Image (spheres, rainbow, N blue to C red):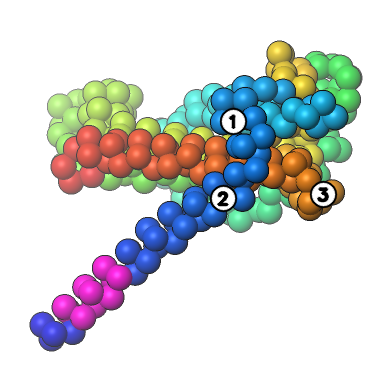
Amino acid sequence: MAMLSRTLERLFFLAAIGSALLTAAVFLLLCQLAKPLFQHGGLGTLLCSPWNPGHGQYGIYPMIVGSLSIAFLSVLISFPFSLGCAFFITHFGPLALRRKLLNLVRFMTSIPTVVYGFVALFLLVPFMREFLTGGSGMNILTASVVLAILIAPTMIIFFVDSLQRVPLSYRQAVDALGGSPAQQLLYVVLPMAWPGILNGLLLGLGRAMGDTLISLMLAGNAVAVPTALTQAARTLTAHIALVMAADFASMEFQSIFACGIFLYLFTALLIVALRLVGRLSPRGL
C-alpha cells in the first residue's frame, strides 16, 4: 500500500510538472510566432498604437480597450445581481424555492453561448437601436449586458458555495441570540465568505475576458478606440477569430499571437490573484 501511494504521488507530481512545462511552452510558442511583429515596432508600439494595417500600424491597443471595457462592464452589471441571487438562495428565499432556483441557475450554465447571442440579436439589439443607443444597436453596452447574463450563473454558483461553507454552528449561534437572517448574513456569513466571493468575482472577470462569440456577434467589431459605451468595439478574442478567418500570411496575422500573449498574461494575473485570495480565506472554508 505504501509503495502504491508513493507511485501515485510521483505520477501526480510528474503530471503537475508536465502541465507547467506545457503551459510555459505555449507562452514561448506565442512569443516566437509574434516575434516578427515585435521586431517591426516593438512591444510598446504594439500595445499603444492604433490598428491601421494600410499605414503599417498593427497595434492591438483598440482591442485591449474594447476587451477590458466589455469585460469590466459586464462584471459590474452581473456582480450585484449574482450576489443578490446567492443571498436569496442561501438565506431569504422560501425553502421550497431555493433548490429549484439553484437548479435553474445550473441549467443556465449549460446553455451554449451562441444561443444567448442569437436571442440578443433579435430582441436586445433592436431595443438598443430604437430606444437607447441608436446606430446599429451593436456596441459595448449591448455586448456587456448579454455577457453579464452569460457569466451570472457561474458567479451565482460560486457565491452560493462560499456562503454555504460558513460553519452551521456560527449561523445557529446568531439564531439563538435572536438575530434576523439579514443580521446573520451581514455580521457572520459575509465576513467569513468574502474571499470566496472575491474568487467568484475574479473567475467571472476571466470568463468575460475570454469570451469570443458574444463580443463577435454584438459588439460591432470596430477597430477604432471606443470613447463611449454606445460605440462599437472589437475585443482581442473577436480579433483573433476575424483575422484567422480571413488571412494566414501577413503582418496582420501575426497580431493574433500578440493578442494571445496579452490574454495569457491577463489570465496568469487572475490566477495569481486567486491564489493570494485563497491564502486569506478563513481556516475551514
The residue positioned 35% from the left and 39% from the top of the image is: 272
Q: Kindly identify which residue carries mark 2.
A: 32
Query: Residue placed farthest to the front in the image?
Result: 39
**Pick the front one: 58 or 189:** 58
Residue at screen point 32% across, 64% down:
17
**Label 3 SS:** loop
Q: Quadrant of the C terminus?
A: top left
Residue at label 3?
247
Q: Position of residue 8 (x, y in %)?
A: 24, 77
Task: Between residue 42 and residue 226, name the one nearer to us.
Answer: 42
Amino acid type indicated by mark 3? Asp
Q: Quadrant of the N terminus?
A: bottom left
CA gap between label 3 and label 2 equals: 19 Å
Residue at the spot x=60%, y=37% of the render?
38
Which region of the structure is painted magenta?
A: 5-14
Instruction: Please say whether residue 142 is visible from this viewpoint.
Output: no
Tell me if residue 159 comes above or below residue 62 in the rendering. below
Q: Between tags 3 and 2, which lies in front?
A: 2
Seen in the picture, residue 161 relative to 228 is either above or below; the reply is below
CA gap, disc 2 and disc 1: 14 Å
Identify the residue under disc 1.
42
Q: Earlier in the sequence, mark 2 or mark 1?
A: 2
Say which quarter of the image contains residue 2.
Answer: bottom left
Where in the figure is residue 102, as x and y percent of width and height?
Answer: 49, 48
Estimate the x, y position of residue 24 in percent, counting from the top left.
43, 54
**How many other residues sit within 10 Å of disc 3, few (<14), some (14-19) or many (≥20)?**
few
Secondary structure beneath label 1: helix
Residue name at image x 28 percent, y 37 percent:
276
User: Which of the two residues, 137 or 227, is positioned nearer the viewer here?
Assistant: 227
3 or 2: tag closer to the N-terminus: 2
**Mark 1 neighbour class, 10 Å CA radius: few under 14, some 14 to 19, many 20 or more:** few
Asked if marks 3 and 2 touch (Cβ < 8 Å), the reply is: no
